[in-house]
Amino acid sequence: MRKKMVMLSALLGLCLTAAFGMGVQAADETEPATELAGTETPETNELGIVEAEQWSEEYPEIVESYLANKDNSEAYSYVEAHPEIATLYEGMGFSSDYNSARGHSYTLEDVQATTRPHALSNCLACKTADYVQLLNKYGVDFYSMSFEDAVAEMNEPITCYDCHTNDPSLGAAPIRQPMIDAVGEDYDSISSSVLSCGQCHNEYYFEPENKAVTHPYTGIANATPDAILAYYNEMGFTDYQNPRTLTNQIKVQHPEFETFMADGSMHKALSCADCHMEKATAADGTEYRSHTWVSPLASQSIMDNTCAACHTDAETVTAKVKDLQEEITARETEVAQILVDLTEKLAAAVEGGEYTDEELDAIRALNRDAQFYWDFVFVENSEGAHNSTLSRNCLDKSEELANEALALFK
Ligand code: HEC
Ligand code: HEC
Ligand code: HEC
Ligand code: HEC
């Protein structure tokens, strides 16, 4: 392991030397000093992390429930389920390789299995705490290190350290600085059981200059779809260009945090943990949170004990979730068809040559905004359950903008 670290710092030194004409003083000769006073913290690994299974003596049930995330292994192809994305995402990897999410145990496996190009290490930022440790050590240049070199240094998928550092007895908290910076002054007003999930389940982009993970807002008031789109448009940010329409598109990621925090969300008094981590009782009678992160619908205990405390009963609230999801996904498909139509008409117009650049650019601008609003809902993992008001509004805006664009064709 130590040999690995020395090799990494040599590699990084090399790539930084090439880029900036200077070496990096990697302080990797000293073991990380993470011994916590007064607690029986197991020994840390070479990245300064106590690995999950080392906690099994102190927190046997929690570690067992954490390991059970392996059972959430099913994933399906969005590309097969939603053929329209081959057109809408044309020009970027997600158009041909895009699977649904599964359990936290699989983050490192899945990020390596995708055939989407991920040239840089920054794709690993929300897959493992190991990444955060190396980033802290090497600084912002670590984001632009090669993916292959960086992934070889990663030990574990999402682990205790991601939400607790090396002291779970202190409760949960985010460790990812970009999210801490993005919520800014609102940090103290947001539950740490929301922020610890929100540090990864969010919308982000790679800063073009240094490839750093960055969130498109500061403060929760600016974390709405409208404000985020305005932010991207102002900086002229582009994730990919559609090769036929030449529209500079934005690819939204997985904005669960922003959707949950926005106006219209009915459950701001709860945390992500309340609905996604069931309460259980240990052998010694103490209550703990299961660390098997699941859909609430997959937990009879959450449905009966958490949801039914406010809703009539588990059946009623399950039906409510399913009805909403059916409505929102049907609307997604409907609006996607309009976006596909717009994409094809625009591609034909580009090819045909009877439009001026100015006319085409006006259509492209509407195309970009329309697709952003649709994507914000399509890639959000609750399919309308977290905030159906926001999801509906986004899809309505998308349709309006797409129709406005379609009206510009001669
Ligand atoms: C370190 C980043 C990170 C943190 C922190 C994190 N997640 Fe995740 N989560 C992911 C990734 C990445 C996936 C998808 C894994 C895959 O498909 O390989 C995922 C998957 C999930 C899934 C499974 C989704 C499915 O469709 O089966 C649930 C549920 C979930 N997370 C909930 C939570 C909750 C609740 C929290 C906070 C207690 C949380 N996550 C914190 C990154 C994170
Ligand atoms: C009031 C309860 C509630 C809260 C609070 C909540 N969620 Fe959810 N979440 C749901 C429901 C309901 C679904 C839809 C489940 C399904 O489709 O089976 C869902 C779906 C998800 C999924 C997809 C899981 C899957 O199996 O498909 C993820 C990931 C997720 N939520 C993350 C979060 C994060 C992160 C937060 C906090 C920012 C959060 N949730 C807050 C109820 C909640
Ligand atoms: C994705 C984030 C996340 C990860 C990873 C995680 N935890 Fe937690 N953990 C939480 C949250 C959130 C709570 C608090 C729930 C609440 O609001 O009460 C919690 C609570 C706890 C508690 C307090 C007692 C309890 O059950 O409420 C302990 C102890 C704990 N976790 C240990 C661990 C250990 C050990 C690991 C690794 C095997 C781990 N956690 C991994 C998010 C996480
Ligand atoms: C603290 C009380 C409370 C708890 C606990 C609670 N809800 Fe709700 N929920 C509400 C209220 C209030 C509303 C708004 C009125 C309504 O639609 O019933 C709501 C609305 C909803 C909606 C509609 C949301 C939308 O955006 O249209 C869904 C879906 C939902 N709840 C699911 C759940 C699920 C699933 C759970 C458990 C995981 C849960 N709720 C737990 C109070 C709660």
Image (spheres, rainbow, N blue to C red):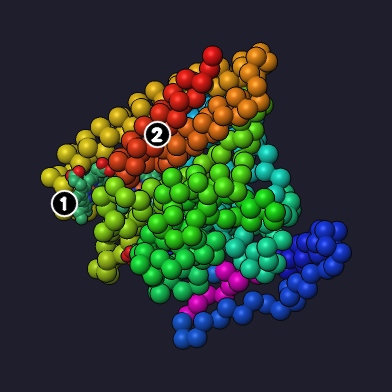
Task: Tell me the magenta residue range.
Answer: 40-49
On the rendered structure, is 52 left or right of 60? right
Cβ(mark 2) to ligand 4 < 8 Å? no
Residue 8, picture quadrant: bottom right
The residue under label 1 is 310
Q: Residue at x 55, y 26 (%)?
A: 363
Q: Residue at x 56, y 53 (%)?
A: 127
- Of badges 2 and 1, the one in the foreground is 2
Magenta span dominant secondary structure? loop
Residue holding disc 2: 397
Tally of marks: 2
Estimate the x, y position of residue 37 in percent, counting from the top left.
50, 86
Amino acid type at mark 2: Lys
Quarter in which the N terminus is drawn:
bottom right
Determine the secondary structure under disc 2: helix
For mark 1, give the secondary structure: loop
Question: Would residue 158 be found to the left or right of residue 288 on screen?
Answer: right
